[in-house]
Each structure stands twice: as C-alpha cells, then as structure tokens.
Image: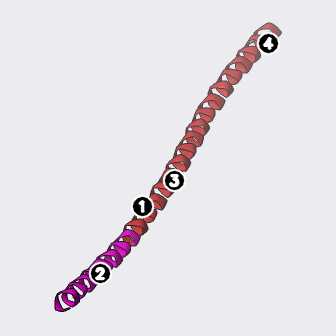
C-alpha cells in the first residue's frame, strides 16, 4: 500500500485540528474547574468575614447586656438606700 504525501498531509492536518480542539476543550474544562474553585474560595471568604462580624456583634451585645445589668443593680441599690434615707428623714420630722 502506497502512502501519498497528500493523504499524509490530510491525516496530519486532521490530527492537529483534533489535537487543538481537544486542547481547547481540556483548557476550558480546567478553567471552569479553576473558576468554580476561585468562586467557592471567595464565597467562603465572604462567609467567614460575615461570621466574624456576627460573632463580634454577639460578644459586644452580650457584654452590653452584662454592663446594663450591673448598672441596673447599682440603680436598684441606690433607690433602696434613698428610700431608707427618706423614711428616716420622715421619722425625724414626725418626732420633732
């Protein structure tokens, strides 16, 4: 069987075209995988930032509630003390 240069050129050209097409498809597939990985990384980063902000807000609000509770106890104690002083003063005024 005799192989002519024309047939060989066609086979080589078809091989190159198929190789280029396979290369383009392979690169596109890898690029899509890389794109998905990058977008997943970005989304995870955004979610981590949101988680950090929410945790910071939670800690701030928890400490704020504790601080307000302390202030409330101080005010209640001061109110009781003033109530006692007022009763004592009223007793003194009644006695005199």
Q: Are marks 2 and 3 in contact (CB under 8 Å)?
A: no
Q: Secondary structure at mark 1?
A: helix
Q: Nearer the viewer, residue 50 or 95?
A: 95
Q: Which residues are magenta?
A: 67-96
* Residue closer to the observer: 66 or 74: 74
**Residue drawn at 22 percent across, 86 percent down:** 93
Residue at 37 percent of width and 67 percent of height: 65
Quadrant holding the N terminus: top right
Badge number at residue 58: 1
Q: Is residue 24 above or below residue 71?
A: above
The earlier-in-sequence mark between 1 and 4 is 4
Res 91 quadrant in image:
bottom left
Q: CA distance from mark 2 to mark 1?
A: 36 Å
Q: Tell me the SS state at disc 3.
A: helix
Residue at horizontal 68 percent and vertical 27 percent from the top: 23
Residue 43 in sight from this viewpoint:
yes
The circle drawn on residue 82 is 2
**What is the spatial separation of the Cα atoms under label 2 and label 4, in whole angstroms?**
107 Å
Distance in Å between CA atoms under marks 4 and 3: 57 Å
């Amino acid at each position: 069987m005799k192989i002519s240069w024309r047939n060989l050129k066609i086979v080589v050209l078809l091989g190159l075209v198929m190789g280029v097409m396979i290369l383009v498809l392979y690169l596109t597939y890898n690029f899509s995988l890389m794109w998905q990985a990058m977008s997943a990384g970005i989304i995870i980063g955004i979610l981590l930032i949101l988680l950090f902000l929410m945790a910071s807000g939670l800690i701030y609000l928890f400490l704020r509630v504790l601080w307000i509770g302390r202030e409330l106890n101080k005010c209640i104690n001061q109110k009781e003390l003033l109530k006692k002083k007022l009763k004592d003063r009223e007793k003194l005024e009644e006695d005199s």
